[in-house]
Amino acid sequence: MKKHNFNPGPSILPRIAVENTAKAVLELEGTGLSILEISHRSKDFEAVVNEAVSLFKELMKIPEGYHVLFLGGGASLQFCMVPFNLLNKKAAYLETGGWAQKAIKEAKFFGEVNVVASSADKNFTYIPKFNIPTDVDYFHITTNNTLYGTEIRHDIVSPVTLVADMSSDILSRPVDVSRYGLIYAGAQKNIGPAGVTVVIVREDILGKIERKIPTMLDYRTHVKENSLYNTPPCFAIFAVKETLKWLKSIGGLEKMSEINNSKAQLLYDEIDRNSLFTGTCEPVARSIMNICFILTEKYKQLEEEFQKFASSKGMVGIKGHRSVGGFRASTYNALPVESVKALIECMQEFEKMHA
Ligand SMILES: *Cc1c(COP(=O)(O)O)cnc(C)c1O
C-alpha cells in the first residue's frame, strides 16, 4: 500500500534526493567509491560540501558576510553552542514551546536569561506578544513550534542580534536572512536526513565574548575550516545537497512557500469543516508545517479508532505529540499534496461513519 509520510522528523524527503543518495551509496559518481567510503579530505567530497553551501546561499539569498556551516550534535547542541559563543551577560528568549524551553534551560548555564513572553499558560497554542529588550546580547526565537503547531511565519525586526531556531520551517518560505545574526536547524525535518545541523551565521557577531570556548564548540573553528575541521557527517551532507537540488528544480523558496501554503490551507479547511475534528491552535498562529488537531469533546473516545483507521489507509506519523495528544500532520516541503488529500479523504470517510 502507498504510504503517506506525515512523520514529524526524521521525515519525508524528495524521492529524487533519496534515489540519488542511494546511487551515491553504491558509487559517488566518477570516484569508484561509495559516499560512505570516501575521504572527507578528498576533492570529491570538498566539492559536495561546496555545492551544498552554494545551493543554500542561492536558495535563501544569503547576503555577504554570512557563513553556512554543517555541524554535528543536532539542533539540541545549538541550544548550548549559541550562548557559549554569544552570551556575555544576558540574553532574551521567547518561550513558545518545548524546544524553546530546552534552549532557555541551556542558556541559563552561561548567564542571565530574560524570558520576554511565554504561551505556556495555554499549552503553547498561540504566539505571545513581546517586546525585545535592548540591554541583551541577543534575542532567541523558535520560528516554528514543531510539537504544538504554531509558527512565526514572518521575519521580525530586532534591535539586538536575532537568533532563530528554524529546525522545522527552514526552507519552507523565503526568509530575509539579513534580519538574523544566526539561524540554526537540525536537518531531519526540511533539509535532509538526521545527522547534520545547519548553522547560518553572520561573521561579525562572533569573537565578542569574554569566556574561552572549546575548539569544537567555537563557530569560528568551523567557519575557518569550511565545516571540515573534523570528520563531518559526509553521507548526510550529500543527501542535503540532493534535497537542495530538488528544491531549486521546483522553483526555489517562493514556489515552495506557495505549495506549502496551499497544502496547509486544504487541511486546515477540512479540520474547520469536519464536525469530528477541531484545531488546537489560535488560527492566526497556525503552523504551515505541523498541523495539530484533536477530536471534539463529543467524539473524544474515537481517538484510537481514527488512528487505526488512518493507518489502515496508509497514513504514517499522525499521532500528536504526547504533550498535546490528538493528531499532528507534519506537512514538510517534500510531502506531496496527494498525501494531504488522502488524509482529508480519511477524515471525511471517518465523519460519514460516525457523525
Ligand atoms: C526537532 C527540533 C529540535 C531538536 O533537533 P535535534 O536535531 O533532534 O537536536 C530543536 N528545535 C526544533 C524547533 C525542532 O523541531
Image: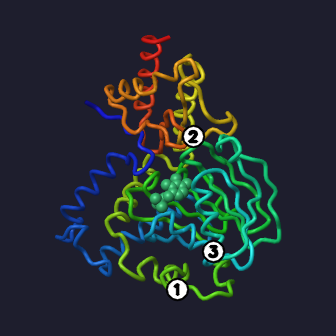
Amino acid at dot 1: Pro
Q: Nearer the viewer, mark 1 or mark 3?
A: 3
Q: Position of residue 156 (x, y in %)?
A: 73, 55
Q: Amino acid at mark 2?
A: Ile
Three-letter code, disc 3: Phe
Disc 2 + disc 3, Cβ < 8 Å: no
Q: Relative to residue 320, is residue 160 depicted above or below?
A: below
Kindly identify which numbered label has been placed on residue 288: 2
Real-space CA distance between mark 1 and mark 3, rounded to the nearest whole angstrom: 15 Å
Give how far across and how far down residue 219 sits, in percent: 55, 78
Q: Secondary structure at mark 2?
A: loop
Helix, strand or loop at mark 1: loop
Secondary structure beneath dot 3 equals loop
Residue tagged 3? 109
> Which residue appears at 53% of the width and 64% of the height?
57
Instruction: State the residue lying farthest toward the front.
Output: 301
- Identify the residue position indicated by label 1 in the image: 214
The answer to which image quadrant residue 236 occupies is bottom left
Label 3 environment density (alpha carbons within 10 Å; few <14, some 14–19, many ≥20):
few
Label whose residue precedes the other's in the sequence (1 or 3)? 3
Where residue 96 sits in the image (x, y, percent)? Answer: 66, 51
Q: Quadrant of residue 78?
A: bottom right
Task: Mark yes or no: residue 161 visible.
Answer: yes
Instruction: Residue 54: give x, y in percent of width and height.
Output: 48, 66
Tell me the quarter of the image containing the N terminus. top left
Can residue 167 be seen by looking at this rendering?
no
